[in-house]
């Protein structure tokens, strides 16, 4: 017979290797030879490590009078095998038997505590038995209090641990702060740890990097990054993954890519961090390239990888690849995964395959709010507004609740349908559930009300609900401008400036439309000054609106100067300039500009064609008008002459002159 120590060592090796069969044979041998009693505690641990808590319990039940070690081993067995409720039951049974809990069992019980009440009781027990200052117990208490959101208690326990604190203690406190969205406190704790002379571990670095990410403190993140490099932890995959995640979420794909390329052993998490970061920052084609590189490296993408790639396919127009991924997921029987389902619905919707999006939605067995939002938003953006409203009503009936994404999407549909009753119902719901302080919802209400010709309701929402942000002012200024309340729009813009808000290209574009409707030349020049001061002249919409405003005010020279200064001229700016020339009697110049537009490869639309016919009408260019009307190159655009063209006042006169007797 070997020594007790040798057999215990052998059981320990079997447990570490999860070698169930050899360990069971040794158990049987001990049973036959009558030496089982000396090894029961080790056997409980062995069966626990081999994922056999039932066998561990049988061994325990054979002990006539279990000591605190046996009880601790049993509690640990249940805890480590995902049975926290039974672990707590074993803990209560141990106490009922009068067995004193030791410093090894207390952390396990704290880990399994279903509520703070039991955690507080265990804390009191630890203090009463003298284990309150034990570093392992203290670390478990910090984790327990942090897990239930009681960070003041967690900090107090940490401070009372005194000089016994180790790197695990500091890491635990940092982690608790991060989990409770107190990332600034976590960064401060990291500084205290370094100042106290404790060397950060890879977990500590990962934790503080996550804190920098959560607080969007890139300067602190860069300092931590420098420390990571100095201490050699930049080769650690967990730390490197955290750094990649931080930089991509801060918009620094360049730095994240460098870190990724230097990683000696990148794993699926590393690839996912960079791929999702590329998608987050609009680098969809780069994300797809990374997927191909990942597959070439021999790593298999998981559902998180593919859900990110589906978003990239939606953004990059890579519909065929998205279809291939869908087929792959069907074969792998993973097409019902929540992440994949949302990605597929979003991809199909953004490619205007709403029937396919609906099929995926109907196929999903579990439909959470994210999936509902993806389909409702897809229908709303795809012009199927009635279906979006129907889905919204169905969502409400199913009781899943709504969020700002849901409300913003459905308000887009109520606006497009010009349904004031639906808008008011959504308004009432938003007020009931407390979303009238959300800028996205408020702006959706403003937009929907004015498109329903209810400007007073839009103004009331703006006055009562909006915060002083640029988006709210843009929405209201746009509403006033579109509803021919240009003077009120200009006044509101002045109020916005008095509040210290800096205008963006969108609000300036809306304001220019107001100036154009009033033929307010001086105010238009002031807006022009704002565009130059803030370097917004490169914005296509703002630049086009400026051209239109000057042309509408009759200042063709200023309109031409603004037009020539645009770095990029699209169909809107060309049409604005051509329309301005036509309106003010410069028919030949308008035609010359039209031909130049065509020569530069810019396709006209029906608004351009309307302006050209207007120019021909005013200039008496009958033959030129006939030629344009019959030229197949021009008729190919926008389906030829639209209903808007044929409804124009001048068109009747034009038709009479070109086709009359």
Image: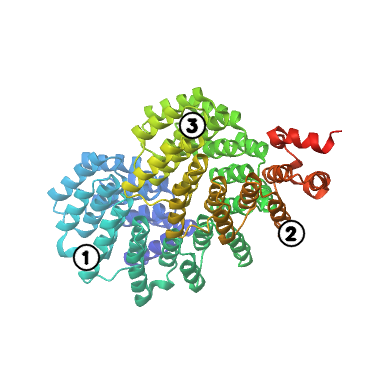
The residue where tag 2 is placed is 599
Q: State which mark lies toward you, 1 or 2.
A: 2
Q: Which mark is residue 566?
A: none
Using the rendered view, name the quadrant where residue 629 is placed.
Answer: top right
Q: Residue at x 46, y 69 (%)?
A: 255
Q: Circle 3 sits in a helix, a strand or a loop, which is it?
A: helix
Q: Circle 2 sits in a helix, a strand or a loop, which is it?
A: helix
> Residue 165: image x %, image y %?
21, 63
Residue 137 horizontal side relative to residue 615, left or right: left
The residue where tag 1 is placed is 192
User: Gap in Å between the C-alphas at discs 2 and 3?
Assistant: 40 Å
Q: Residue at x 57, y 51 (%)?
A: 311
- Residue 440 in sight here: no
> Residue 188: image x %, image y %?
24, 61
User: Gap in Å between the C-alphas at discs 3 and 1?
Assistant: 55 Å
Q: Earlier in the sequence, mark 3 or mark 1?
A: 1
* Crowdedness near tag 1: few (<14), some (14–19) or many (≥20) residues, C-alpha within 10 Å: few
User: Gap in Å between the C-alphas at discs 1 and 2?
Assistant: 67 Å
* Crowdedness near tag 3: few (<14), some (14–19) or many (≥20) residues, C-alpha within 10 Å: many
Q: Is residue 272 above or below residue 236?
A: above
């Amino acid at each position: 017979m070997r020594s007790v120590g040798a057999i215990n060592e052998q059981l320990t090796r079997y447990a570490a290797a999860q070698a169930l069969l050899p360990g069971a044979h040794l158990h049987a041998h001990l049973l036959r030879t009558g030496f089982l009693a000396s090894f029961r505690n080790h056997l409980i641990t062995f069966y626990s490590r081999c994922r056999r808590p039932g066998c561990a319990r049988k061994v325990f039940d054979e002990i006539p009078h279990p000591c605190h070690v046996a009880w601790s081993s049993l509690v640990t067995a249940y805890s480590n095998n995902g049975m926290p409720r039974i672990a707590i039951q074993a803990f209560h049974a141990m106490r009922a038997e009068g067995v004193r809990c030791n410093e090894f069992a207390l952390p396990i019980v704290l880990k399994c505590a279903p509520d703070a009440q039991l955690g507080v009781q265990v804390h009191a027990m630890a203090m009463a038995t003298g284990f309150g200052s034990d570093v392992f117990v203290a670390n478990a208490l910090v984790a327990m209090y942090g897990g239930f959101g009681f960070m003041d208690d967690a900090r107090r326990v940490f401070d009372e641990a005194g000089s016994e604190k180790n790197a695990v203690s500091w890491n635990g406190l940092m982690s608790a702060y991060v989990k409770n969205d107190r990332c600034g406190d976590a960064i401060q704790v990291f500084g205290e740890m370094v100042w106290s002379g404790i060397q950060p571990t890879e977990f500590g670095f990962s934790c503080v990097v996550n804190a920098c990410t959560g607080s969007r403190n890139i300067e602190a993140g860069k300092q931590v990054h420098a420390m990571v490099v100095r201490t050699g932890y930049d080769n650690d995959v967990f730390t490197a993954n955290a750094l990649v995640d931080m930089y991509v979420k801060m918009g620094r794909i360049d730095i994240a890519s460098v870190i990724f390329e230097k990683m000696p052993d990148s794993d699926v998490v590393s690839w996912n961090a960079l791929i999702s970061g590329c998608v987050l920052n609009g680098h969809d084609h780069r994300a797809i390239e990374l997927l191909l590189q990942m597959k070439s490296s021999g790593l298999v993408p998981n559902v998180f990888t593919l859900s990110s790639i589906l978003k990239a396919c939606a953004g990059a127009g890579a519909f065929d690849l998205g279809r291939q991924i869908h087929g792959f997921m069907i074969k792998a029987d993973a097409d019902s995964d929540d992440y994949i389902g949302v990605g597929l619905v979003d991809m199909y919707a953004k490619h205007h395959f709403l029937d396919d999006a609906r099929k995926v939605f109907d196929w999903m067995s579990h439909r959470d709010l994210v999936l509902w939002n993806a389909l409702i938003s897809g229908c709303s953006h795809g012009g199927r507004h009635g279906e979006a409203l129907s889905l919204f009503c169905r969502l409400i009936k199913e009781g899943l609740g709504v969020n700002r994404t849901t409300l913003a999407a459905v308000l887009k549909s109520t606006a497009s349908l010009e349904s004031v009753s639906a808008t008011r119902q959504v308004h009432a719901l938003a007020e009931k559930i407390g979303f009238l302080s959300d800028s996205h919802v408020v702006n959706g209400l403003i937009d929907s009300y004015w498109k329903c010709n209810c400007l007073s309701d839009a103004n009331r929402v703006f006055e009562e609900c909006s915060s002083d942000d640029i988006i709210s002012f843009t929405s209201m200024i746009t509403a006033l401008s579109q509803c021919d309340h240009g003077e009120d729009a200009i006044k509101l813009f002045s109020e916005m400036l008095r509040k210290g808000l800096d205008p963006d290209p969108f609000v300036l574009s809306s304001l220019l439309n107001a100036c154009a409707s009033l033929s307010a030349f001086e105010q238009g020049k002031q807006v022009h000054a704002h565009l130059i001061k803030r370097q917004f002249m490169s914005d296509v919409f703002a630049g086009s609106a400026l051209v239109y405003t000057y042309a509408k005010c009759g200042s063709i020279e200023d309109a031409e100067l603004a037009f020539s200064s645009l770095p990029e001229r699209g169909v809107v700016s060309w049409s604005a300039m051509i329309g301005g020339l036509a309106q003010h009697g410069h028919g030949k110049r308008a035609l010359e500009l039209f031909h130049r537009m065509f020569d530069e490869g810019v396709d006209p639309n029906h608004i351009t064609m309307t302006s050209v016919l207007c120019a021909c009408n005013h200039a008496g260019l009958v033959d030129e008008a006939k030629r344009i009307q019959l030229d197949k190159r021009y008729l190919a655009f926008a389906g030829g002459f639209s209903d808007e063209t044929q409804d124009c006042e001048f068109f009747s006169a034009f038709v009479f002159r070109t086709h009359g007797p």
